[in-house]
Image: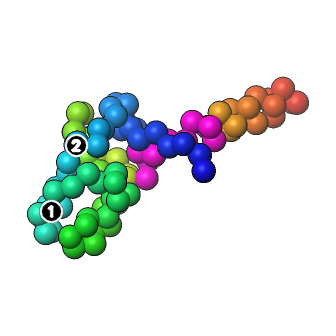
Amino acid sequence: MAKVEIYCPKCGWHPSEEDRWSCVPDCGNVWNTFSTRGVCLRCGKQWKFTQCLWCWEFSPHEDWYHYPEEESRADIKEEETEGAA
């Protein structure tokens, strides 16, 4: 399985395991949203967007997950395609 890096797609901030988000206005649970891929442990709500605790911007939750190995492969394929033209 590819190693994942979690960081804000807008500002690049990396959350730590100690950072917490709140399930508001739903059940009020407080947890690390990345430990459950955006699912509240108390009520089961799937959060589609996550707010950055640094820049305060909202981004789709899935956009926080970055796979450097896969991104490198995509860059290589793109370069090969450009070189073949």
Report how many numbered discs are placed on residues in the image. Answer: 2
Three-letter amino acid code at the position of disc 2: Asp
Q: Is residue 55 magenta?
A: no
Whole-angstrom CA distance, mark 1 to mark 2, is 13 Å
Tag 2 or tag 1, which sits nearer the N-term?
2
User: Can you say which quadrant of the picture contains the C terminus?
Assistant: top right
Label 2 Cα neighbours within 10 Å, binned few <14 / some 14-19 / many ≥20: few
Q: Can you see residue 81?
A: yes
Instruction: Answer left or right for 75 relative to 26.
Output: right
Residue furthest to the right in view is 84
Q: Secondary structure at mark 1?
A: loop
Residue name at image x 20 percent, y 70 percent: 42
Q: Which residue is mark 2?
A: 19
Q: Nearer the viewer, residue 41 or 76?
A: 41
Q: Is residue 14 above or below residue 28?
A: above
Image location of residue 52, percent across then percent down: 26, 41
Q: Which residue is mark 1?
A: 29
Residue range of the region highlighted in magenta in the rendering: 62-71
Q: Secondary structure at mark 2?
A: loop
Three-letter amino acid code at the position of disc 1: Asn
Q: Can you see residue 78?
A: no
Q: Main secondary structure of the magenta part?
A: helix
Q: Quadrant of residue 39?
A: bottom left
Residue name at image x 62 percent, y 37 percent: 69
Label 1 Cα neighbours within 10 Å, binned few <14 / some 14-19 / many ≥20: some
Q: Nearer the viewer, residue 33 or 77?
A: 33
Q: Nearer the viewer, residue 45 or 18?
A: 18
Image location of residue 37, percent across then percent down: 38, 57
